[in-house]
Amino acid sequence: MLELKSPTIDRSKLLPASLRDDFPILQQIVHDEHPLVFLDNAASTQRPRQVIEVLRRVYERDYANVHRGIHTLSERSTEQYEEAREKVRAFIGAEKPTEIVFTSGTTAGINLVARSWGDANVKAGDEIIVTTMEHHSNLVPWQQLAERSGAVLKHIPITDDGLLVLDTLDTLLTERTKIVAVASVSNVLGTINPVTEITRRAHAAGAVVLIDAAQSVPHLATNVREIGADFLAFSGHKMLAPTGIGVLFGREELLDAMPAFLGGGSMINRVWEDRFTPAELPAKFEAGTPPIAPAIALGAAIDYLKLIGLENVQRHEHELCRYAYERLLEVDGLRILGAPPDRRAGLVSFTLPEPHAHDIAQLLDERGIAVRAGHHCTWPLHDRLKIAASTRASFYLYNTPAEVDLLVEVVGEIRERFRPKGRKRRGGS
Ligand code: 7TS
């Protein structure tokens, strides 16, 4: 009989576990006796002391509104806010800080493009291309634009293995295609999509490209110029920063030509009773008081990630994810959604014949393990896979192989508990 090698982990690829000391929230016991195992990082990550300290310092010493007050605190806040923009620029390889618009998150960034760029450029009969694996945030805004404009929405399909059927892109792209909007990493399948290739093909057809980078910027080194992205959106809270801050990168030429989206303070150059002229970039797209302290803390999160090295974060997550993938397959009847380990970022979604994903998540929580269950805001993807829901474990730089072992052990116990009576485990032993 074929001897199956049991999965092993290469510890030389992992980050030191001492890094967990930077995350106070991880040092807790839940349900009275279980150390917290936080595997819900694709939904939102935790923050290190270094980021929390910066938030504290801003609120205890430097905080005031930006870009308006001629006083010490406003100058300090403005300087730090703009420094954070510069850190973001360098982190994603953008050419100019004017190409970095602070938003409240990925969703806000994509909606900004769909409203401002979309309403100005997309007309009845034009085409918008997305994929079957998009998060609702990169689908519904395009459905709404199609509804407003009379444009047609098309989807790049996926294989049963959760990879894009890239060959169809060339037939989907026509001279009427205005934009291709695609996730760089799927929040359910973990698939790393070939966004540079997609961008090259879309540009050859005259379309612009928006990358939903919510699940890639926190984990994989990103360079918007190498990708050739026209727009790229991501969220701070998925990369060790606070909620309420996100980034929209847009090529200057495109942002310049786009009409302002939200109207109000800060986004104007001059206002009269009956009209206004817009401010320069990026202020044109930052109406109202922005998330000042969260933006500065995003800069601190980037400092932290750079100190550890994004390539080390990526290697750590990849090793953990491969180990989790192989070990979870030991559980009888467990189905992993999507790509093989070498094509995926650090998350694994799965189903069991019994029980329902929500029950699995609740039973895992009873043992201190936090995962997400449901359709993960990817309803069409779950329809395509013919499942109602899945359970997702998603990793970040502070997770450990021992946490993966516990996850597998408890998932195995759940499987045994819900196995229909009288039925033996497949393959015995
Ligand atoms: N795009 C992708 C690929 C995402 O995974 C998410 C959030 C978003 C967009 C929206 O980001 P937001 O910060 O604007 O909310 N994804 C998830 C998730 O998978 N579980 O909870 C949130």
Image (cartoon, grey):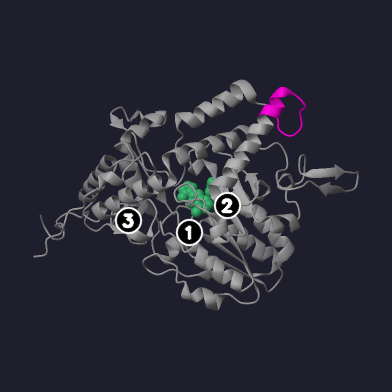
At x 53%, y 76%, the residue is 170
The residue tagged 3 is: 351
The residue tagged 2 is: 233
Q: Earlier in the sequence, mark 3 or mark 2?
A: 2
Q: Earlier in the sequence, mark 1 or mark 2?
A: 2
Q: Residues within 10 Å of mark 2 (few under 14, many from 20)?
A: many
Secondary-structure class at tag 2 = strand
Marks 1 and 2, how far apart in space? 21 Å
* Chain part drawn in magenta: 65-76
Observer-nearest of 98 and 133: 98
Q: Is residue 36 magenta?
A: no
Q: Amino acid at mark 3?
A: Thr
Figure label count? 3
Q: Which mark is residue 379?
A: 1
Q: Earlier in the sequence, mark 3 or mark 1?
A: 3
Secondary-structure class at tag 3 = strand
Q: Is residue 115 left or right of residue 340?
A: right
Q: Quadrant of the N terminus?
A: bottom left
Q: Residues within 10 Å of mark 1 (few under 14, many from 20)?
A: some
Q: Position of residue 75 (x, y in %)?
A: 71, 28
Q: Position of residue 418 (x, y in %)?
A: 24, 50
Marks 3 and 2, how far apart in space? 30 Å
